[in-house]
Image (cartoon, coloured by chain):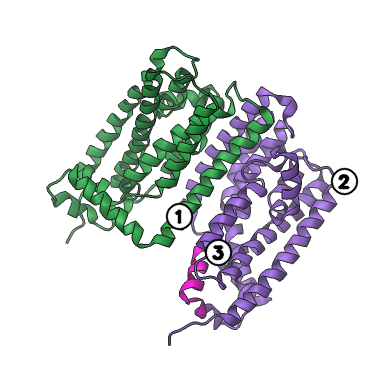
Chain colours: A green, B purple
Amino acid sequence: MGLYKKFFLIHLKSHMTYRSSFFFLCLGRLLLIGNLFLSVYFLLDRFGTVQGYTLPQLMLCCAVVLLSSSLAECFGRGFDRFSRILATAQFDRILVRPRGIVFQVLCQDMRLSMLPGLLQAAVMLAWAIHGGAVVWTPYKVLVLALMVLCGAAVFFGVYLLYAAVCFFTLEGLEIFNILSDMPREFGKYPYGVYGKGVLWLLTFLLPFALTQHWPLQVLLDRAPARYGLLPLAALLFLLPCALLWQLGVRHYTSTGS
Amino acid sequence: MRTYLAFFKMRLLAGLQYRAAALAGMGTQLVWGILEVLLYRAFWLENPDSFPMDMAAVSAYIWLQQAFLSCFALWYWEQDLFDAVKSGTVAYELVRPVDLYGMWMARSLALRLSRAALRAGPILLLAVLLPSPYGLRCGVSLPVFGLFLLSMALMLVVVCAFVQLLYALSFHMTDATGMTTFLSSVASVLSGNLVPLPFLPEKLRTFAALTPFGSMQNVPFRIFSGDISLADMPAALGLQAFWAVALIVAGAWIMRGGVRRAVIAGG
């Protein structure tokens, strides 16, 4: 953990060296998420509610997805660029070092452009709370924390899956972006809005709904309290991902000289 | 003119080589389209009376967006050209005996067309096969279809001319990133990329339709989906033509000034 902190500081410093480009990166992010908010706002301004959700309630949903995807992107960035790590034979160097493989890949790159995301998520959350979206209890705070953390874990699982497939294809498969980009982009609404088919897919196959749609029902008093623990079940998704990753590492043959 | 045509053809053929990327892009676009249609469906079922367009028209709009993404997406500019201006390698382009503006315009048009050519067909085909209010209905009359094609061509010119304006402006600043990120997010709202313009609040919609952004995807897609009546089409097309000319004139003028001012060091 101490080592991880050290790597984090290194990346922080390297980002801060190019201050103006970092600033513009953040500004771009801020505007991008601002647009995401506007797209929800314009439609809700016209319709009032969608499937009974009001604007503050949707803000809560947006904030959760934004937080978990920002966290995953910040810390799992190394996996996102895994095809490059393989292509440039950096993976050989990783294998010979006396530290965990996953740990080292995580340390390769960290993205601090998640900062504006965190900031905006905080604003949205504040709005949701101020707008009286939820009657808070200690249990619900716990559920909210679980949603964010387990949501980040599922995003992380998708990154891991992507990296594992890279072992076999040796290049990044763009098609995998669907698995991480779509849930993030469309997670601004509870997945139930898209109909039963999508909800089932995202519950049993790619369990993003377990960290978003179902526990959200608990926060809004629409479902029994036990649904609030479903985010923990989403962690099961990490098992097959980790398995495939192991398989990939075993499959790896260096081209080294 | 022949030089530009040759340049256009060269770039078009180069763009058509990227078939694997096109396949991945197509998959993304398909899933994106389906989710988007499902989202508007939820709003439509919630309250059909506050829906400013037909559901079928919204679906058509969404599917045309997915199919022709590369024709209107402002963020499909070429970072290479911004970098060339910044680093000074633009000198290699300037020594050629052709006008920089015309050459880059041909380049942008070819790039966008080649990307659309690879992606549009299968997406449109699948969209036509979808059930009634959620797919792409194709019951447009021949004259309307003609106007749609004309409007598509104008859209492509307006979009490329706008991006040319950005390249031209980048001659006058050290780093174009701030400008491009800001403008692309403004454009996303005003062009009807975020939500179709009829869904915006009244005042904002009127304003957006008059800006150059309103002359992009907003016009052709709504002509095809039947959301713009035949009587309103001449005005919309006229505005598109106006912006196409205005942006080209402004862009060429600014670029000429930029090139004259530009100092490139090195031997």
Residue B183 makes an appearance in the image: yes
Q: Main secondary structure of the magenta part?
A: helix
In this rendering, is residue B115 above or below B107? above
Q: Same chain for labels 3 and 2? Say yes or no.
A: yes
Going 41% across and 57% down the picture, which residue do you hit?
A: A22
User: Residues under labels 1 and 3: Cα distance?
Assistant: 34 Å
Residue A240 x, y percent position in the rendering: 29, 31
Q: Which residue is mark 2?
A: B231
Chain to which the residue tagged by mark 2 belongs = B
Question: As shown in the figure, which amino acid type bears the numbered disc 1?
Answer: Leu
User: Residues under labels 3 and 2: Cα distance?
Assistant: 39 Å
Going 36% across and 33% down the picture, which residue do you hit?
A: A154
Chain to which the residue tagged by mark 3 belongs = B
The mark lying in front, picked from 1 and 2, is 1
Residue B250 x, y percent position in the rendering: 70, 69
Q: Which residue is mark 1?
A: A25
Q: Are marks 1 and 2 in contact (CB under 8 Å)?
A: no
| Label 1 crowd (10 A; few <14 / some 14-19 / many >=20) | some
- Numbered mark located on residue B24 in the image: none
Residue B230 x, y percent position in the rendering: 85, 45
Q: Which residues are magenta?
A: B78-91
Residue A156 shown in magenta: no
Q: Which residue is mark 3?
A: B13
Chain to which the residue tagged by mark 1 belongs = A
Q: Quadrant of residue B195?
A: top right
Question: Residue B137 versus residue B109: which sits nearer the camera?
Answer: B109
In this rendering, is residue B27 above or below B52? below
